[in-house]
Image (cartoon, helix red, strand yellow):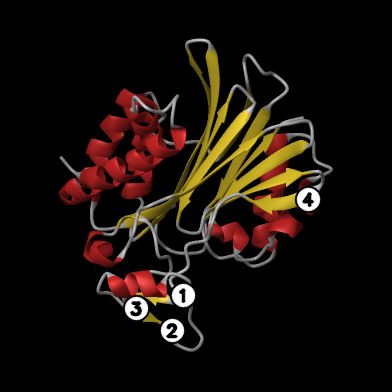
Amino acid sequence: MTAREILHKMKVKAGFSSVPPDTGKGKGKMLKHITHGFNLVKGKASHPMEDYLVSQFKQMDDKELGLFAIFDGHMGHDVANYLQLHLFENILKDPGFWTEPENAIRRAYDKTDGEILEKVPVLGKGGSTAVTAILINGQKLIVANVGDSRAVICKNGEAKQLSVDHDPGTEKREIERRGGFVSNIPGDVPRVDGQLAVARAFGDKSLKLHLSSEPYVDEMKIDDTTEFMILASDGLWKVMSNEEAVDSIKHIKDAQSAAKHLTEAAVTRKSKDDISCIVVRFQ
């Protein structure tokens, strides 16, 4: 059985469509004023689409969770696909999630990375960045990320980045401490061991000794001044600043239309990468 066939069976068992939609929308069942929409656009590369996402609400006992994530694969899409299926599952299964969510998320990121490395014969040697956001009862937002997929919130009309871009140039000392190096060739971006343009990622077995999967985690309260959140892969952020992205959709009340607007704007600005985007509106 091929890796693709195994992943297809895993997706069907997990209740996901075998062909994820390119666009969609939804809203909370308990908190109907919170809406979300997403849109994906394949880039110019000849390989298949490598971005995956999660955008949904989930009921757990008397709580409602909004689960949102962008997974940007590289050297193949299977690792990003695996993350789509299993990362939130591992987070929510952690017994400490409700009492110490930040530590639970860190443990789940580490556990999932270990699973991916164990499944290299099936998933291949590729990797994926990730940005995840968990909204608890519409009141608390917990964002985590590895790599350069990004979460940006609009609060009081201003853009605020909730994630951290894990750039090899910024984390050069840590990469070198692990025994790796950071290339900085003129005309190119800094790369771990001359290969990967992010300092943290899931998978990437050949670089793992020099590459971290430790997430940055941030937590914030949602209040009346919190307008909306954008999660997107670097296909958007390479061509658009946080402020430009926020300003361009302030007037668009439908979350799906806002996500489409952002992906289309990135294409117009000549982004050649895969572009995936989620917009969550709190008002």
The amino acid type found where label 4 is placed reads: Glu
Quadrant showing the N terminus:
top left
Question: Badges 2 and 1: C-beta atoms under 8 Å apart?
Answer: yes
Q: Residue furthest right?
A: 251
Give the x, y percent position of residue 14.
34, 25
Which residue position holds label 2? 184
Mark 3 secondary-structure assignment: loop
Residue 146 lies, in percent from the top left, at: 44, 53
Disc marking residue 194: 3
Residue for badge 1: 169
Q: Amino acid at mark 3?
A: Gly
| Of the image marks 4 and 2, the number of the one nearer the N terminus | 4
> Which quarter of the figure is the C terminus placed in?
top right
Give the side of residue 30 with respect to residue 176, left or right. right
Q: How many marks?
A: 4
Tag 3 and tag 1, C-beta contact below 8 Å: no
Q: Secondary structure at mark 1?
A: loop
Q: Earlier in the sequence, mark 3 or mark 4?
A: 4
Tell me which residue sits at (17%, 47%) in the image.
118
Q: Are marks 4 and 2 in contact (CB under 8 Å)?
A: no
Quick check: can you spot residue 84?
no
N-terminal-most mark, 1 or 4: 4
